[in-house]
Amino acid sequence: MPENNSATRDYAAWFNGDQDARRYTLITLVCYALLYGQFALGLAGAIPFWTLCLTAPVLVVRWMFAQHELFHLRTAREVDPLTRLLPLMLTPLSLGYQEYLNIHYGHHRHMATQADPEYFQLRGGKVSGFINALTAPEQAFVRRVLRNPIDAELLIGTLLRLALFTSLVWIGGASFWWYWLPVRLAYGLAYFSFFYCLHRCGEEYGVYPIKLSPGKQTVFGLLFGKDALLGTCHHDAHHRQPRVSAYRLPEAAL
């Protein structure tokens, strides 16, 4: 039997395509609609606010993974205005699609080194790693502004996101915390899992596969999607072949 040589594989046959880009775009938009729609229903008294504590972790992770896949499929000019704005209201000052795309490309080029834009999330112990993940939106904004001058796109996007954030606070009043706390905590936990847990192994820095029991895989897949499960468990393969579909990463890992 011929030896399986990864150097001879046609990885291009495993790449995501236009249909995948449309699907991931739809997922991000649906997650926005469900998050803000649920908050609106809470304000209207139709459902209790505490239900956001149940749905926010699922919606945030599904949104985050779909957004991640889009980064490998579409430039900022190729996505719709809402996706480009990136209106997940977490902080008064936040970045948009273009800025996070640049950060993600930098993460792939300089993974787990001091030149990695996400390195601040990887250094130190688990407590500091989680705190950095929880404050990643603010840190990303400040680090971007300190590194580069504010261009017109970032200025306009920042003002639009600031206006949306302020409107959400004004409309929600004290109930705003029912939206913000579950979403922010879910975001921090997801970032900690996706960066620190996948790029640290004790004192070592790199990228490492995650092995889950069959039961945990089933629960993970049901909650967050099979593609998110495979993209997480085979994150090392993703860094070797960033354009390969998450569904084909187990094969790419062999």
Image: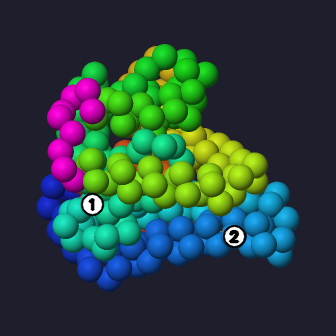
Q: Depth-wise, is mark 2 or mark 1 nearer the camera? A: 2
Q: Residue at x 75, y 49 (%)?
A: 174
Give the residues drawn in magenta, as a range. 145-153
Can residue 235 be seen in this snapshot?
yes
- Please indicate whether residue 224 sits to the left or right of residue 76 in the image: right
Instruction: Please tell me whether mark 1 sits on a helix, a strand or a loop.
Output: loop
Q: Quadrant of residue 111?
A: top left
Left or right: 86 with respect to 211? Answer: left
Q: CA gap, disc 2 to disc 1?
A: 32 Å
- Name the spot of residue 179 as percent of width and height, x first: 68, 54
From the top left corner, tell me how far across and down residue 69 is, in percent: 36, 62
At 55% from the left and 21% from the top, the residue drawn is 128
Graded by Cα atoms within 10 Å as few (under 14), some (14 to 19) or many (20 or more), the crowding at tag 1 reads some
Q: Quadrant of the N terminus?
A: bottom left
Which residue is depicted at the point 80% across and 60% down? 49
Was residue 148 drawn as part of the magenta stretch in this picture? Answer: yes
Measured along the vertical axis of the image, is residue 79 above or below residue 76? Answer: below
Indicate which disc, 2 or 1, sits on the residue closer to the N terminus.
2
Residue 91 location (% of width, % of height): 51, 43
Q: To which quarter of the image does residue 12 belong?
A: bottom left
Q: Is residue 51 above or below residue 238?
A: below
Name which residue type carries label 2. Ala
Badge 1 is on which residue?
A: 72
Query: Which of the pair 202/171 is nearer the observer?
Result: 171
- 247, 180: nearer the viewer: 180
Q: Is residue 5 magenta?
A: no
Residue 40's mark? 2
Residue kind at label 1, given as amino acid type: His
Residue 220 appears in the rendering: no
Q: Which quadrant holds residue 221?
A: bottom right
Residue 56 sits above or below residue 245 on the image: above
